[in-house]
């Protein structure tokens, strides 16, 4: 299915998915299609780069550079040996990598999640090490996980990479 972002949003806001129709919104909207490899300059100081993820149906990750700092937001991404060098280049020396860590390595293999478009905290650590990134935040947690299980994953991850944290509601990170 190859739909525009505008079509996806308008469809998502149709009954029965959403109670307010898109046409009823008072705001005006301008949609801009983006693709992997785009560099979007928002201002002289803010640049956004994009990276195509390994995910069924497609997905794009973002790198935001501002004021000498950078943050990479890698959601719905499955680690992929074919793209690993490009992904390392994309995240190189970033201050923060926010990474899809839905599974552990053991779960990924045992549950046969290959091809589902999500990754592991271990793959996230491998990435930030290769990319010389400063911090790693694990997110896109499995919704079946308890807070205690996430805390345990965070402790295990910090043994491997001390600047690694499990995302939490209300979490604020200063760069």
Image: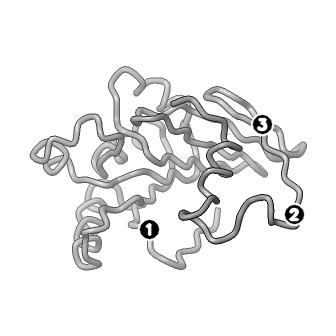
Q: Which residue is mark 3?
A: 40
Answer few, some or many: residues within 10 Å of disc 2's Cα (few below 14, many 20 plus, some between 14 and 19).
few
Q: Residues within 10 Å of mark 3 (few under 14, many from 20)?
A: few
The residue closer to the viewer here, 32 or 17, is: 17
Q: Residue furthest top?
A: 82
The quadrant in which residue 166 appears is bottom left
Q: Is residue 90 above or below residue 77?
A: above
Which quarter shows the C terminus? bottom right
Q: Position of residue 11 (x, y in %)?
A: 62, 50
Q: Residue 96: horizontal and vertical position, in percent?
A: 55, 53
Residue named by callout 1: 167
Asked if the residue at tag 3 contacts the one at tag 1, i.e. Cβ–Cβ closer than 8 Å, the answer is: no
Q: Residue at x 23, y 63 (%)?
A: 156
Q: CA distance from mark 1 to mark 3?
A: 27 Å
Q: Nearer the viewer, residue 31 or 78?
A: 31
Q: Which is closer to the viewer, label 2 or label 1? A: 2
Residue at 88%, 45% (x, y): give it.
43
In this rendering, the count of numbered labels is: 3
Quadrant in the picture for residue 113: top left
Q: Which of label 2 and label 3 is nearer to you?
A: 2
Looking at the image, is 171 positioned above or below residue 95?
below
Q: Earlier in the sequence, mark 2 or mark 1?
A: 2
Q: Can you tell which mark lies on residue 27?
A: 2
User: Quick one: label 1, few (<14), some, or many (20+) residues within 10 Å?
Assistant: some
Which residue: 37% across, 46% down? 124
Under circle 3, the secondary element is: strand
Coordinates of residue 149 in the picture (x, y in percent): 22, 72
| Residue 47 found in image quarter | top right
How far is the residue under mark 2 from the one under mark 1? Answer: 32 Å
The disc, 2 or 3, on the residue closer to the chain's N-terminal end is 2
Q: Secondary structure at mark 2?
A: loop
Which residue is outermost to the left? 110
């Amino acid at each position: 299915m190859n739909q525009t972002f505008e079509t996806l949003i308008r469809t998502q806001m149709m009954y029965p998915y959403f109670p307010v129709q898109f046409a009823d919104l008072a705001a005006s909207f301008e949609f801009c299609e983006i693709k992997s490899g785009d560099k979007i300059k928002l201002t002289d100081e803010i640049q956004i780069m994009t990276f195509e993820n390994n995910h069924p149906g497609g997905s794009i990750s973002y790198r935001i550079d501002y004021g000498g700092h950078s943050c990479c937001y890698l959601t719905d991404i499955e680690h992929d040996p074919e793209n690993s060098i490009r992904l390392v280049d994309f995240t190189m020396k970033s201050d923060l990598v926010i990474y899809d860590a839905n599974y552990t390595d053991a779960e990924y293999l045992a549950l046969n999640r290959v091809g589902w478009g999500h990754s592991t905290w271990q793959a996230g650590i491998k990435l930030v090490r290769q990319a010389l990134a400063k911090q790693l935040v694990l997110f896109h947690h499995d919704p079946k996980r308890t807070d205690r299980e996430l805390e345990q994953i965070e402790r295990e991850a910090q043994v491997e990479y001390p600047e690694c944290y499990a995302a939490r509601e209300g979490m604020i990170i200063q760069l």
